[in-house]
Image (tube, rainbow, N blue to C red):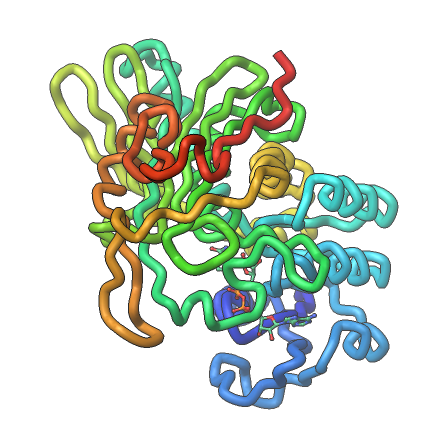
Amino acid sequence: MTTTFAVVGIHGYGKQHLHQIGQLAAEGRARLVAVVDPRGTDGAAHVPPGTPAFGDLSELLAETVPDVVTFATPIHTHLPLAAQAMRAGAHVLLEKPTTASLPELRELIAVADETGKSVQVGFQSFGSHAFDRIAEITASGRIGEITGIGGIGLWRRARSYYDRSPWAGMRRLDGLEVVDGVVTNPLAHSIASALRIAGARRAEDVAEVVVDLFHANDIEADDTSAVRLRTTSGMPIALGLTLAAEEPHTTPRVFVHGTAGSIEFRYTSDVLIVRAGGGEKTEEVQRTSLFENLLDHLQHGIALLADVRDTGAFMRVLEAVRTAPDPAPIAAEHQEIVGEGPESYRVVRGVDDWCRKVSEELATFTELSAPWTAAPAAAHAPASAPQHTHGVRA
Ligand SMILES: NC(=O)c1ccc[n+]([C@@H]2O[C@H](COP(=O)([O-])OP(=O)(O)OC[C@H]3O[C@@H](n4cnc5c(N)ncnc54)[C@H](O)[C@@H]3O)[C@@H](O)[C@H]2O)c1
């Protein structure tokens, strides 16, 4: 059986969607019937020649309704576009973060319920077989009792990353929520993966979120942040994340801390490192693609790996970021600008070690007194209040 696909948003991450669909097409399982982008297909060599192209989703749906529409479009377009596709009769693969707010997520789930359509969300790490393996290792008692889950993400983004699109690095745009910061976009997978290890899937599985948001770049949103949270089951989780890293070639990783050892999960490469009993063992695990899983779901009733409903726990974190005070700037004395022009980038001094401390001590930058969290010397009170607690329920 061949499932028809259309890809909406083709000039950025949509390339990956086209690549995945191309692989499934080679196996005879999928067929690309159209692409949609207001920028057209000029310069999009990754779009197969002859693919019908439309300037917006309404034009496509007036012509044909594919079985699945995939979206790699700006965050603030996710809810309206995905809802429109479902109401027209298509299933959806929607990039993360699911929507620009928790109320929007609830609306999207309501449309999925009402139309009976499936929504897979682009948290590709959810396809990793690491989660089952981590559950096996922890159940075996090899790392003792679990004491918490940590995470570090050390990346760098150049000026050109923020200049590529009007929504990049914004919290709001033209009165719409955008929430495009390090926590909610580039390193969102690390938080989503930590939550999944803890078994937190739905919004109600998260009891408390503390966000500690800063920016080194000249942007509105955060690029250097700590997130500390507690699941309803009582698991503490904390991650230190930056796009202004000193050593940017470290793959992002999530740690399961135990009383007798630890497990490190490198979610971009599906590598697990188990440290216990004085030794260290590295394992590689497989990954199921979200596209393949969506086809298995539609054709054989297999459960979705990243069902929209199971992104609720992550969306509690996004909601905490969205409703927090604006991120505080990191003073010039704590950072360096390297290079000039579009490829110049910022580095926050010492940030790599502070992210590691967040992950190990399960505390935020402010709680740990990282240097950039101190109020400027001339001020009597902090210039801003970047640390914000959201929805304490316990
Ligand atoms: N899963 C991942 O690892 C991953 C990685 C990168 C980006 N993403 C996600 O993909 C989405 C897009 O990010 P990006 O970095 O590619 O953004 P981008 O701004 O670089 O590209 C977005 C594309 O969508 C098009 N577009 C904008 N509005 C549209 C509309 N109304 N209809 C159709 N097309 C429209 C733009 O012209 C552009 O081609 C975001 O949700 C982002 O978080 C996911």
Q: Quadrant of residue 93?
A: bottom right
Q: Image point 57% across, 22% down: which residue?
A: 208
- The image shows residue 46, relative to residue 353, as above or below, that is below
- The image shows residue 145, relative to residue 173, as above or below, that is above
How many labels were placed on the picture?
0
Expressed as whole percent of the image width and height from the top left, the position of residue 145 reads 35, 10
Of residues 96 and 70, the one drawn nearer to the viewer in this rendering:
96
Of residues 180 and 124, the one drawn nearer to the viewer in this rendering:
180
Residue 104 placement, left or right of 63: left
Of residues 168 and 21, the one drawn nearer to the viewer in this rendering:
168
Q: Image point 56% across, 58% down: which residue?
A: 170
Specify whether residue 88 is in view: yes
The quarter of the rendered structure image containing the N terminus is: bottom right
Specify whether residue 22 is in view: no
Of residues 248 and 50, the one drawn nearer to the viewer in this rendering:
248
Expressed as whole percent of the image width and height from the top left, the position of residue 366 reads 38, 29
Residue 17 placement, left or right of 197: right
Q: Residue furthest left?
A: 278
The quarter of the rendered structure image containing the C terminus is: top right
Expressed as whole percent of the image width and height from the top left, the position of residue 217 reads 39, 57
Q: Image point 57% across, 74% down: which residue?
A: 10
- The image shows residue 234, relative to residue 246, as above or below, that is above
Q: Image point 51% across, 20% down: which residue?
A: 230
Expressed as whole percent of the image width and height from the top left, the position of residue 281 reads 19, 30
Q: Quadrant of ligand 1?
A: bottom right
